[in-house]
Amino acid sequence: MNTFEAISQRRSIRKYRDEQVPRDLIEKILEAAMLAPSGKNRQPWRFVVLEGRKKTEFIDLLKTTEKVRGFEGNNTGSFRQTITGMDKAPVVIIVLNAYFDTCIEDGRLNHYRWLTDVQSIGAAIQNMLLHAHELGVGTLWICDILYAEKEIRAWLNTELQLIAAVSLGYADEHPFPRPRKPWKEVTGWLDK
Ligand SMILES: Cc1cc2nc3c(=O)[nH]c(=O)nc-3n(C[C@H](O)[C@H](O)[C@H](O)COP(=O)(O)O)c2cc1C
């Protein structure tokens, strides 16, 4: 499979077969993440892999938090649906930013550094998705977990900034490609 085939064939997978992903494949997917470019080669990404009992604990935390947010009258969008998909995935990888605290200077956020780190982490996540696809493993990039940011950081006992999660498993669905805007609609091309 060449790179463009991986890019064009990958789909977000929200239904998974009841089958474990071997550890060596998870490690290969993490290796792909490490190969992403990063601003100043800072490699700000950190990962926490959840399987089995810990994954169940994590999903329970999300379910409880989603209910609490609902009682508080918050709109949690697609969070509940996303949790349902994650529940079936054998693996969830939490993605964190190790350097958010270094982006605070004199009490103010240095946007340049922070945006650079967040883009680097996005590149790492995309590498994971593409390599997983190549290895026959389905993935979903998840930001709905940010609704539970405070709770997740407390559960992990971490000061690091929560960025996203990626669920992984063998696909139990074959989604059609979701529509994309043509490049002409989103690109300005200045005259030479
Ligand atoms: C930054 C980011 C956050 C996302 N968060 C979620 C999420 O929380 N729940 C979900 O079901 N899908 C999530 N997605 C998946 C998108 O819905 C999906 O990529 C988009 O609809 C295009 O579909 P495709 O990935 O199959 O091409 C996210 C994707 C990205 C890139």
Image: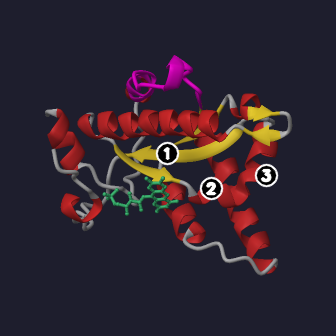
Q: Which residue is mark 2?
A: 145
Looking at the picture, which amino acid does disc 2 mark? Ile
Label 3 sits on residue: 150
Q: Quadrant of the N terminus?
A: top left
Q: Secondary structure at mark 1?
A: strand
| Residue at 14% across, 33% down | 2
Callout 3: helix, strand or loop? helix
Residue 80 placement: quadrant:
bottom right
Mark 3 residue type: Lys
Q: Are marks 2 and 3 in contact (CB under 8 Å)?
A: no
Q: Residue at x 57, y 33 (%)?
A: 117
Name the quadrant where ligand 1 sits.
bottom left
Query: At 29% from the left edge and 54% from the top edge, which residue is drawn?
Result: 11
Q: Earlier in the sequence, mark 2 or mark 3?
A: 2
Q: Quadrant of residue 106?
A: top right
Taking the image as drawn, is residue 96 in sight?
A: no
Q: What amino acid is found at the position of numbered circle 1 in the picture? A: Val
| Quarter of the image where one finds residue 134 | top left
Q: Give above or below for 152 relative to 98.
A: below
Tell me, for residue 166, which label it has, or none: 1
User: Is residue 30 depicted above or below 118 in this figure?
Assistant: above
Q: Nearer the viewer, residue 43 or 64?
A: 43
